[in-house]
Amino acid sequence: MANRGEYTINNLYLGGYSSLSPNYGYSVSAGDLGITTDPRSANVLKEVSSKLSGGSKKVELALVSPEIFDSIPKQYLKEAHRLGKLTGVEMSVHGPVMDSAGMSQRGFSEVDREMAERRMADVLKRSYEVNPDGNFPVTFHSSEGLPGTQWETTAEGRKIKKLIAIDRDSGKMIPLETETRYYPGEDFKKVTPSTPEKELEIANYSEWSNSLDQSFFNKERADEILRLNEPLIRNVLEGLQSGKYTLETLDPTQRAVWNSYQTANSYLQDVHKNINNLFSKAYKYGTPEQRNELMRISEKFKEDLKNKKNPALAESQAIQNLLVNLKRKDIAPQMYVPIEEFATEKSSQSFGNAAFEAYKKFGEKTPILSIENPPSGFAISTGEELKNLIEKSREQFVKRAVETGKLSESEARNQAKKLIGATWDVGHINMLRKSGASEKDIIKETEKIAPFVKHIHLSDNFGFEHTELPMGMGNVPLKEMMEKLPQKDIKKIIEAGTWWQHFQTNPMKEAFEGLGSPMYSTGTGPFWNQTLALQQGYFSGYGQMLPSINYETFGAGFSRLPMELGGNQQASGGRMSGTPME
């Protein structure tokens, strides 16, 4: 923009109307934009060459399928690097989409989680061939196929409508929704619905209480045997302890008493074993306050076992006290947790360990592990959830680096911050609309993740389906989102898989138009959304409106000029109309 006297000149050329005029009030330079390869193809050399011919200065290898990624010869990634160096194009990689938490239809498996971790480390190491000169983003989804918490937007704000909880031991998932419960003795007219959060508390205590009930039952069986035979048992035990009796010298009645004692003791041993498992689980998953209380209960149990005169009776009474203490509601561990919490705990191990494995090999030139928000509706898809995952993944990186002696804690934290970040997909977060979220909610989630963003994926949709249209064709509030996101050294990659599938053309021009990109690096007009008014400009305009001879004559260099103008074309009628001259 320039000021001349009383006039302000915005553009030398204002252009004309376009159905793709940007409505963002925000413009992206064409040189800052990149394009992905076709995710359906393993022929990355052909794909990269195709995208280079379209003029893109940044190319992302979309290797989202594990099978396709493993179908790429190792020489092809090296050759892709050479093509990038030759043309001055920056490369990045979208790694295979997979579950990083170790979840499957069978539930959680640590073996599956470790397998995902090894796969990610392998992807990082192989992707290094694409750009061995420095750090560049390799994107992985935060989760795959895991159903997330469902929200609803009310006048009071966003509330949980449906919560997916998972057992931290077995990996079993249960859905929890708002439910109205009726109990005897209550005024049913005043009953209020139980929220999903309250249902989670109920599920945890019910699970804990049910686990203890079997121990109570077996304990009662042992007590009944001991109570009915207590005088005889005491006599037999005292005789065996003093040497008065031996097992061989017991008469039939005494032997029957001894067998009853052994049965009761067997019940108590089973109870003791079950309680040990439950106590371990309570301590493992308990809060710091619960652990302190469990330590106190453990000391009390040890004191109760010191009665040696009648070990069975002593153990029975000690176990009784222990069971009563463990049955308390404040002791019940949180076995069921929201799936986002569980997936964050497990996935952070995979991401942190994979990044560290790559760092051990490549050091300062390690690729950046960039974690992307999946389409809204899946677990770990909001800005807040992704932020928590990245922070925990960085903590895991630091833990591994310090434990192995590879880095000091301060050095490890610097590397973790540098090597683990976020890829923010503006189309994926826009799908919050289907749960009733507003534009303000979407922008707020973007603001939460902004400090962690190292990479941006651009795709448009209408907030309900996971479509990938060029920007400007849906309702993604891009201007407001981009104002929250960092701009310096951040690659912006156009994802348009839906466009390839249905329209089968390179979406770069449509993306440039939708983003209002200037045609020239000076930043002044014309802009790509104004090309409709340009005569035959950059693949658009109104096409060949004049007869073909006009374009054959004046659009093919000197070889088709008429003889009177120095060319070889014979006169054969009107130059412009193609009809005979009269």
Image: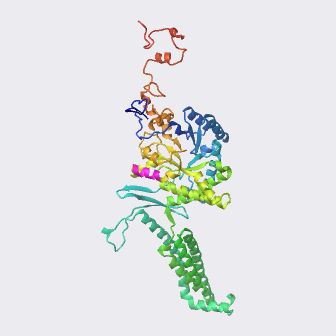
| Stretch of the chain drawn in magenta | 439-447
In which quadrant of the rendered view does residue 110 lie?
Answer: bottom right
In the depicted structure, whether residue 258 falls above or below residue 525: below
Quadrant of the snapshot with the C terminus? top left
Give the farthest residue toward the left.
189
Q: Residue at x 58, y 36 (%)?
A: 47
Colour scheme of this structure image?
rainbow
Q: Nearer the viewer, residue 163 or 480?
A: 480
Secondary structure mostly taken by the magenta-highlighted segment of the chain: helix
Picture coordinates of residue 426 (x, y %)?
A: 47, 46
- In terms of depth relative to the viewer, which is nearer, 254 or 126? 126
Question: For residue 443: magenta?
Answer: yes
Which residue is farthest front? 5
Q: Residue at x 69, y 92 (%)?
A: 243
User: Quick check: is 7 in the magenta stretch?
Assistant: no
Q: Quadrant of the N terminus?
A: top left
Give the image location of residue 443, x and y in percent.
43, 50
Query: Does residue 106 appear in the picture of this structure?
Result: no
- The percent position of residue 238, horizontal first and vertical second, equals 63, 92
Mark yes or no: residue 499 visible.
yes
